[in-house]
Amino acid sequence: QVQLVESGGGLVQAGGSLRLSCAASGRTFSSYAMGWFRQAPGKEREFVATTSWSVGTYYADSVKGRFTISRDNAKNTVYLQMNLLKPEDTAVYYCAASRYGSSWPTAAGDYDYWGQGTQVTVSS
């Protein structure tokens, strides 16, 4: 069982930055692929980024070059550094853990555990 708790969301102006954190419980954190998803009002949850212990990181085209996912296995924490934020980045951001640790899972159904979400609002 893995429990995930996100933090770091908030209100920021367009062009600004935020860093989201996701603290995980459980001794097998390093074996999971960790991902970030987001869901805007009236839209489906969409993939943002994922990090795997064996194959590195992978990003959605919409955030490539602006967002960076990283993990600290010693702290059981995954981060999402978001730069050059745009109003269309406004959403609830969710952290998730996937047992497919040796790949880049990009579908929500590939993830086994989810956090409660943190709101990110980007004003124009």
Image (tube, grey):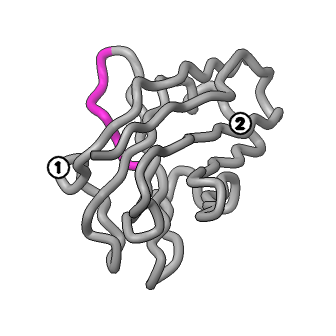
- Give whichever of 1, 111 is nearer the camera: 1
From the top left corner, tell me how far across and down residue 42 is, in percent: 30, 16
From the top left corner, tell me how far across and down residue 117 is, in percent: 45, 25
User: What amino acid is at disc 2?
Assistant: Leu
Q: Main secondary structure of the magenta part?
A: loop
User: What amino acid is at disc 1?
Assistant: Gly
Q: Which residue is most to the left? A: 109
Q: Which residue is mark 1?
A: 109
Mark 1: secondary structure: helix
91 left or right of 106 in image: right
The residue lying at 43 percent from left, 34 percent from top is 94
Quarter where residue 75 is shown: bottom right
Magenta-tinted stretch:
42-47
Counting the numbered discs, the total is 2
- Give whichever of 21, 25 is nearer the camera: 25
Quarter where residue 38 is shown: top left
The reply to whether callout 2 and callout 1 are in contact (CB within 8 Å) is: no
Residue 58 highlighted magenta (yes or no)? no
The residue lying at 40 percent from left, 32 percent from top is 115
From the top left corner, tell me how far across and down residue 31 is, in percent: 39, 70
Quarter where residue 20 is shown: top right
Residue 66's place in the image compared with 65, above or below, is above
- Mark linked to residue 85: 2
Residue 78's place in the image compared with 56, above or below, is above
- Mark linked to residue 124: none
Measured in 3D between alpha carbons, the distance from the residue under mark 2 to the one under mark 1, in whole angstroms, is 27 Å
The answer to which of marks 2 and 1 sits earlier in the sequence is 2
Crowding at mark 2 (Cα within 10 Å: few <14, some 14-19, many 20+): many
From the top left corner, tell me how far across and down residue 41 is, in percent: 37, 15
